[in-house]
Amino acid sequence: MSAGSAVCTTCPRHCAVAPGAMGACRARTNVDGAVVPLGYDHVTSLAVDPIEKKPIARWKGGSTVLSLGSYGCNLRCPWCQNHGISQVGEGEVPWRRVSPQEIAALAVRLNHEDPRMVGVAYTYNEPLVRWEYVRDCARLVHDVGLSNVLVSAGCVSAEVVQTVAPLIDAANIDLKVFRSKTYQSLGGDLAAVQETIRLLAATPTCHLEVTTLVVPGINDTDEEMDELSSWLVSVDPGIVLHVSRFFPHWRMQDRGPTSIARVYELADVARRNLAHVYTGNC
Ligand code: SF4
């Protein structure tokens, strides 16, 4: 570790970040020996989306949420659908500063225009690499009586999850695979994601759903889906699982989309364990 470096504890990568340098996520830096968000309030994407698009299937159906994202991610999934913002840094994508106060005020205005707009979603790139911004926005959004939705890969420390969980009303966590080695190849950590799911499931005020994208040759066996869904039911039988169809993106162009029949078969495998299983992208 070079002189002046500080270790970031936000996620299991535990980057040693030199003064002024970036962590692997391109979203945190070292200022005066403390690892802090790089671009705390930098927003690249802001849109009103249906809640079903997050996807959230069993919470406030028919509602919409003001959805915001920034740049950066701590994972390196080669099929990332949002690589244009998740796999780039500050100088590589347009952004603008939007303070938590502005987010809350915009949410209030949109809610007054259409009461079906129920709150704010932290989404698109990995929101928890700037968990301080999520925390600050979420507090203000609750203060004005609206809801918070988190869409995350969940590969962060338990401390980060425990900080934001009481502020989150609904979450969708990506459980990308159920093999530790495959998670490592993505830059992630299965145990950390499992702990995130456990902590959110144990938060009574948070509705929890999980998404698994079925990628041919990566995680598309009956055995893996059975193990994944068995583990989810052991955490909470009420967890909703989305089994989603892969399409070639970014650095994974060497295979075609998952067959729709295979997505349906794997959803049926999951249904042997879980009561609420949905298919996506079919
Ligand atoms: S959040 Fe970013 S800087 Fe911190 S450990 Fe993870 S990848 Fe590294």
Image (spheres, rainbow, N blue to C red):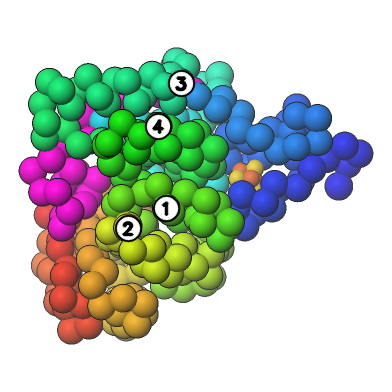
Q: Earlier in the sequence, mark 4 or mark 3?
A: 3
Q: Kindly identify the residue that appears in the image at 12 percent across and 20 percent down.
A: 113
Which of the two discs, 3 and 1, labels the residue nearer the N terminus?
3
Q: What element carries label 4?
A: helix
Q: Is residue 143 visible?
A: yes
Query: In percent of the image, x 75 and y 47: which residue is there?
Result: 7
**Is 136 on the left or on the right of 16, as rendered?**
left
In this view of the protein, which residue sits in the foreground, 2 or 50?
50
Residue 256's spot in the image, x, y percent? 25, 54
Residue stretch rendered in magenta on the structure: 42-65
Task: Pinpoint residue 277: horizontal percent, then vertical percent.
Answer: 17, 68
Q: How many marks?
A: 4
Determine whether label 2 and label 3 are within 8 Å by CB: no
Query: Which residue, given by chain and number where applicable, does mark 4 sit on?
Result: 140
**Quarter of the figure with residue 142:** top left
> What numbered label is drawn on residue 205?
2
Residue annotated with mark 1: 166
Viewer-proximal residue, 104 or 65? 104
> Which residue is under mark 3?
99
SS label for mark 2: loop
Q: In which quarter of the image is ligand 1?
A: top right
Answer whether residue 133 is magenta in the image. Answer: no
Query: CB atoms at circles 1 and 2 under 8 Å apart?
Result: yes
Q: What residue type is labelled 3?
A: Ser
